[in-house]
Amino acid sequence: GDSVTQMEGPVTLSEEAFLTINCTYTATGYPSLFWYVQYPGEGLQLLLKATKADDKGSNKGFEATYRKETTSFHLEKGSVQVSDSAVYFCALSDRSGGGADGLTFGKGTHLIIQP
Amino acid sequence: KAGVTQTPRYLIKTRGQQVTLSCSPISGHRSVSWYQQTPGQGLQFLFEYFSETQRNKGNFPGRFSGRQFSNSRSEMNVSTLELGDSALYLCASSLARDVGWDEQYFGPGTRLTVT
């Protein structure tokens, strides 16, 4: 079945540092890929998405590129802020079988940014 | 436009009891999905409802069930509660377009504690 693997952390960085959170996936079809963010006490918010190979998703300074050859979708940001502290989830949706299949999530990466 | 709402936000139940959680999707959204989030297993897909019919289902026992009403509101029920059912239950709604990728919007979740 489909699966997503990501570094679990916690990842602790200083403000303005460069961020990379690795994500790799296994899927039988041609999935769409997502990064979601969860702030304390809240539900998940979609951060960015890519629906086909070589697509780059971007939002709020975060970027991720859909790499089919390495089955990866790593999240990057050039300069993190304290407000970026949250849990980040990599996810995929494999609709090759038809219908709105549920999202498959990684375990989440807890990011802590220190001032 | 109001977001996805879930009630109640917190719930404490005893082993063996049953529980019903409620989700109101964003106005105009036709699909509602449910997810269970635990520290050990992470985020796992429970089921998805569209037009009052269960369209997709994850790998959970029959104690977990749901339904959707004609106004797209959804409920999920867990019978004969076990300690391992303690989790954050997240609901997500989407437009359910016929083709292409379909963004899911998540509610804040219901925190269920089983004692």
Image: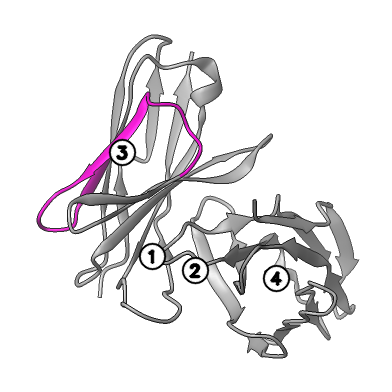
Between marks 1 and 4, how big is the CA–CA gap? 34 Å
Quick check: marks 2 and 1 in contact, CB under 8 Å?
yes
User: Looking at the picture, which amino acid does disc 3 mark?
Assistant: Pro
Between marks 4 and 3, how big is the CA–CA gap? 28 Å
User: Looking at the picture, which amino acid does disc 1 mark?
Assistant: Gly
- Give the secondary structure at mark 3: loop
Please say if B24 is above or below B40.
Answer: below
**Which of the 4 image quarters holds residue A30?**
bottom right
Quick check: marks 2 and 4 in contact, CB under 8 Å?
no
Question: Which one is in front in this view, the residue at disc 1 or the one at disc 3?
Answer: 1
Task: Point out residue A3 in the picture as x, y percentages from the top left corner.
Answer: 69, 54
- The numbered disc on residue A99 is 1
Reading the image, the residue beneath label 4 is A84
Please give left or right for residue A91 compared with residue B45 in the image.
Answer: right
Sort mark 2 into few (<14), some (14-19) or many (20+) by Cα contacts within 10 Å.
Answer: some
User: Looking at the picture, which amino acid does disc 2 mark?
Assistant: Arg
Asked if residue B75 lies in the magenta stretch, the reply is yes
- Give the secondary structure at mark 1: loop
Between marks 3 and 2, how big is the CA–CA gap? 32 Å
Reading the image, the residue beneath label 3 is B8
User: Residue A19 versus residue A48: which sits nearer the camera?
Assistant: A48
User: Looking at the picture, which amino acid does disc 4 mark?
Assistant: Asp
Co-location on one chain, circles 1 and 4 = yes
Co-location on one chain, circles 1 and 3 = no
User: Residue A34 versus residue B88: which sits nearer the camera?
Assistant: A34
Reading the image, the residue beneath label 2 is A95
Q: Write the start and end of the magenta stretch as one range.
A: B58-76
